[in-house]
């Protein structure tokens, strides 16, 4: 998916991630990211996450580094972008943690995460 054209390569929030797929990293304009970070004095948002080939590789790395022995116990979330935080995907256990919050609305029941043959995430958050 990468950075949207409207952002002109400025992916300042990417620095908050632990992992990123290669297509996202390749869409960044590092000058814009770094200039924005220096101007806003938010240098901690500018470092790059570990770049992996595909969304599937990123997902596997997230699960394997989330400090649980059983992947079914992982508490994970997927966002479309930092501009679209009103709708996110969360793992079932994470949903159970937040379900009592009055600001949380279940849009659809849990279902398996799906990836295309090339390892690209296929979900409502990346369309």
Image (cartoon, rainbow, N blue to C red):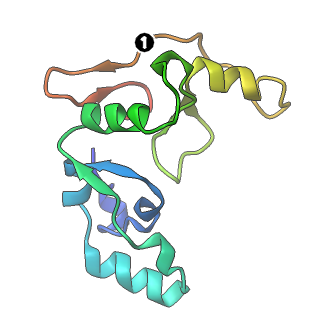
**In the rendered view of the protein, which quadrant contains the N terminus?**
top left
Whether residue 7 can be seen here? yes
**In the rendered view of the protein, which quadrant contains the C terminus?**
top left
Tell me the quarter of the picture where residue 122 sits: top left
Vertical placement of residue 77 versus 48, above or below: above
Tell me the quarter of the picture where residue 97 sits: top right
Which residue lies at the image location 55% right of the left edge and 12% below the top edge? 110
Q: Secondary structure at mark 1?
A: loop
Which residue lies at the image location 83% right of the left edge and 31% below the top edge? 101
Callout 1 crowding tier (Cα within 10 Å): few <14, some 14–19, many ≥20: few
Task: Using residue 90 as the reference point, say whether residue 51 is left or right of it.
Answer: left
Q: Residue furthest front?
A: 69
Which residue lies at the image location 42% right of the left edge and 12% below the top edge? 112
Q: Position of residue 45 (x, y in %)?
A: 48, 70
- Residue identified by numbered label 1: 112
Task: Using residue 64 as the reference point, say whether residue 119 is left or right of it.
Answer: left
Task: Using residue 12 as the reference point, say whether residue 20 is left or right of it.
Answer: left
Vertical placement of residue 47 versus 95, above or below: below
Whether residue 127 can be seen here? no
Vertical placement of residue 32 versus 86, above or below: below
Q: Position of residue 111 (x, y in %)?
A: 48, 10
Which residue lies at the image location 31% right of the left edge and 68% below the top edge? 8
Task: Using residue 104 as the reference point, say whether residue 116 is left or right of it.
Answer: left
Q: Position of residue 124 (x, y in %)?
A: 43, 26
Q: Position of residue 76 (x, y in %)?
A: 53, 32
The residue lying toward the viewer, choosing from 81 and 57, is 57
């Amino acid at each position: 998916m990468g950075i949207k054209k409207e952002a002109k390569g400025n992916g300042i929030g990417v620095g908050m991630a632990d992992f990123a797929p290669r297509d996202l990293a390749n869409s960044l304009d590092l000058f814009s990211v770094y200039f924005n970070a220096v101007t806003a004095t938010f240098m901690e948002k500018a470092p790059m996450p570990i770049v992996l080939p595909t969304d599937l590789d990123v997902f596997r790395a997230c699960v394997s580094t989330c400090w649980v022995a059983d992947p079914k116990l992982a508490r994970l979330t997927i966002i479309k972008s930092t501009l679209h935080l009103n709708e996110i995907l969360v793992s079932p256990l994470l949903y159970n943690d937040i379900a009592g919050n009055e600001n949380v609305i279940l849009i659809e029941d849990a279902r398996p995460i799906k990836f295309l043959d090339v390892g690209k995430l296929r979900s409502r958050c990346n369309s």
